[in-house]
């Protein structure tokens, strides 16, 4: 079987090539000595993320941040970037969501067995947390791209017999437990992760912190470099994902001292992490040479929160090949060959005939409709206009906004059918988020004679793939400016699903009114009272659905398909992680 050289992507015959090597028990084949040397010696980018969504059966992610980390790894492998990624093993996952008949979310653990999918690395490191030594080991998953590129992903694990039972549990629950538990996880991720990379002999050129959870890695780098902040700075890159002060991870120095006092001088830490409390975002900002927000608007907000910091913008993307449904993949392969590794080629989507776009969409829609009709008691209709809304169930996402005026909502479905599909997990302690689900169950009951509504259980990457390709319109109604980026609308666009969203996060850069989709409410640039803004949002939500979206969907199919194509040719071609990673490479990794 022909394989690909992980360095330059050339085909190699494992039987014939003399350039092969075995690392961590796996064989790698190369076309030349140069490539092999490069693979063995090239210093890597170390990408740290508390959550990573790399496969649906590895449930170590909770939402957009983790899926973005997964897409980052997928695109880095496509581009054959020398990268190694580090995360926690989260043996009990985030949560498996069941919903009772009256809309009550039931939180179940989402246990998985790393030993079934990953390879245990023999090296072990120690970190002193409080008075105890905590041993940390790692499990390896090699993510392989079809281009031959490989990105090793290490899952850190403290479930080791010699550890105190309490410490064994540190890497159990993603975002579980109290503040003390969270801080210990962040010690394991940042300090433990850096030590594991050293123990595995990785040579690292840059450390990229995906959100502040891993910023304690800077302390390990300070320690290794005689507390020289300049050296640490040169090696660190930080991407913030948080739009408001209240959402930053902060820890009291009493606790920090209790757990970390043995590992690092706390007075030194205060220089970078804030005077009164340890602010993980500030720590990362103060010790990184390159800092960025995840959209242009988010960069502007971050600059206001941290005056004096030069914060760049690298707008997020999604991994095109992962988030394009099978039918559109086939179309793109036929009409736009090469699109998967060069998604900018999607600008040529007009090569695909309109009928084929529509046929492809109906196939994807049928898969979703069949799934819904099997899973629920609602029978959905493939010819009916279907709006989708799926994301973490939490207050600022305003999942119930469309139910603000039930009479106007009912009016929308008077002449032609309208169907609504929802999904999303609430964090186990997010009371508001859980209420949101209950409310939708209530509306579903109230409106059952007028509008078909479903709330699908256990939103994960597999369900996301069905939803973002199988509905007609993708709805997003966050409370600005709380959506730093958002990425599910980018996934929808790859499948010709049209976005209808509040102008916040990425949609400020993606929306061309009436061309790529529609905006809900005024631009944030317009100075309008908040109460007035809320009113205008509702006006747009109902009026645009009634007077633009419904007529276009049912009566102007050609125009509709044109907008589907614009979603692909004017959104997907840009909002992807191949473009995003090329930006990180030229602006952050190579400087
Ligand atoms: C893409 C994705 C998200 C992020 O969606 P947003 O709309 O950006 O919040 C969250 N969860 C899953 C499972 C996803 O696939």
Image (cartoon, grey):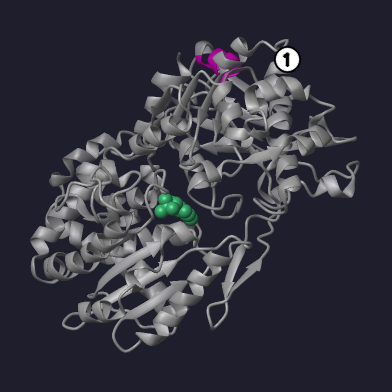
- Taking depth in this image into account, of 413 and 458 the one nearest to the observer is 413
Disc 1: CA contacts within 10 A as few (<14), some (14-19) or many (>=20) = few
- The chief SS type of the magenta part is helix
Seen as rendered, the residue at the extreme bottom is 449
Residue 278 picture quarter: top right
Task: Tell me residue 583's x, y (percent).
Answer: 37, 26
Compared with 520, 198 (above or below) is above
Q: Is residue 347 left or right of residue 46?
A: left
Is residue 48 positioned above or below 383 on the image? above
Label 1 CB sits under 8 Å from any ligand 1 atom: no
Q: What count of labels does the image hold?
A: 1
Whether residue 286 is situated above or below residue 26 in the rendered picture: above
Q: Is residue 42 visible?
A: no
Quadrant the C terminus occupies: top left
Q: Is residue 401 visible?
A: yes
Q: Mark 1 points at which residue?
A: 224
The residue sitting at 72% across, 54% down in the picture is 177
| Quarter occupied by residue 160 | top right
Highlighted magenta segment, given as a residue range = 35-44
Q: Is residue 302 left or right of residue 235?
A: left
Image position, residue 497 (x, y; %)? 27, 57
Looking at the picture, how far across and down is residue 467, in whole percent?
38, 62
Residue 148 in the figure: left or right of residue 497? right
Q: Residue at x 36, y 35 (%)?
A: 315
Describe the element under mark 1 as helix, strand or loop. helix
Residue 39 shown in magenta = yes
Q: Quadrant of residue 167?
A: top right
Q: Where is residue 587 in the image (x, y as percent from the top left)?
A: 40, 20
Q: Nearer the viewer, residue 564 or 223?
A: 223
């Amino acid at each position: 079987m022909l394989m690909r050289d992980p360095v330059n992507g050339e085909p190699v015959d494992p039987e014939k090539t003399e350039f092969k090597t075995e690392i961590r028990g796996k064989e790698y084949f190369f076309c030349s000595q140069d490539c092999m040397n490069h693979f063995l010696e090239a210093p890597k980018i170390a990408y740290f993320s508390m959550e990573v969504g790399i496969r649906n059966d590895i449930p170590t992610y909770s939402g957009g941040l983790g899926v973005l980390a997964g897409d980052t790894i997928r695109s880095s492998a496509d581009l054959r970037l020398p990268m190694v990624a580090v995360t926690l093993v989260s043996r009990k996952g985030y949560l498996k969501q069941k919903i009772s008949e009256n809309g009550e979310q039931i939180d179940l653990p989402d246990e998985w067995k790393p030993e079934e999918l990953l390879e245990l690395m023999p090296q072990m490191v120690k970190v002193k947390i409080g008075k105890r030594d905590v041993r940390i080991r790692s499990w390896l998953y090699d993510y392989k791209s079809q281009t031959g590129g490989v990105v090793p992903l290490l899952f850190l694990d403290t479930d080791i017999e010699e550890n105190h039972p309490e410490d064994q549990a540190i890497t159990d629950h993603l975002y579980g437990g109290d503040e003390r538990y969270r801080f210990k996880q962040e010690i394991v991720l940042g300090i433990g992760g850096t030590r594991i990379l050293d123990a595995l002999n990785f040579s690292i050129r840059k450390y990229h912190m995906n959100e502040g959870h891993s910023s304690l890695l800077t302390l390990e780098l300070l320690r290794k470099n005689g507390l020289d902040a300049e050296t640490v700075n040169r090696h660190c890159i930080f991407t913030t994902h948080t739009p408001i002060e209240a959402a930053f991870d902060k820890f009291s120095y009493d606790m920090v001292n209790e757990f970390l006092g043995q590992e690092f001088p706390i007075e030194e830490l205060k220089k970078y992490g804030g005077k009164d409390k340890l602010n993980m975002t500030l720590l990362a900002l103060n010790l990184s040479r390159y800092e960025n927000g995840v959209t242009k608007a988010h960069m502007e907000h971050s600059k206001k929160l941290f005056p004096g910091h030069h914060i760049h913008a690298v707008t997020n993307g999604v991994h095109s090949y992962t988030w394009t449904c099978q039918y559109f993949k086939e179309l793109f392969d036929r009409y736009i060959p090469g699109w998967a590794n060069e998604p900018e080629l999607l600008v040529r989507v007009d090569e695909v005939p309109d009928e084929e776009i529509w046929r492809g969409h109906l196939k994807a829609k049928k898969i979703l409709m069949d799934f819904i009709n099997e899973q629920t008691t609602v029978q959905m209709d493939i010819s009916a206009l279907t709006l989708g809304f799926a994301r973490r169930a939490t207050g600022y996402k305003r999942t119930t906004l469309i139910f603000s005026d039930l009479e106007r909502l009912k009016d929308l479905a008077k002449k032609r059918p309208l169907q609504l599909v929802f999904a999303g997990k609430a964090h186990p302690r997010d009371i508001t988020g859980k209420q949101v689900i209950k409310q939708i169950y209530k509306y579903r009951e109230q409106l059952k004679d007028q509008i078909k509504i479903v709330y699908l259980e256990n939103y994960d990457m597999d369900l996301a793939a069905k939803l973002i390709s199988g509905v007609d319109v993708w709805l997003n109604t966050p409370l600005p400016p709380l959506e730093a980026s958002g990425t599910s609308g980018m996934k929808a666009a790859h499948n010709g699903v049209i976005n209808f969203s509040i102008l916040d996060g990425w949609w400020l850069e993606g929306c061309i009114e009436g061309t790529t989709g529609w905006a809900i409410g005024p631009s944030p640039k317009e100075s309008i009272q908040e109460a007035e803004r809320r009113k205008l949002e509702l006006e747009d939500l109902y009026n645009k659905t009634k007077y633009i979206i419904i007529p276009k969907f049912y009566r102007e199919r050609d125009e509709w398909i044109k907008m589907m194509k614009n979603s692909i040719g004017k959104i997907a071609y840009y909002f992807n992680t191949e473009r995003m990673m090329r930006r990180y490479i030229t602006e952050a990794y190579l400087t």
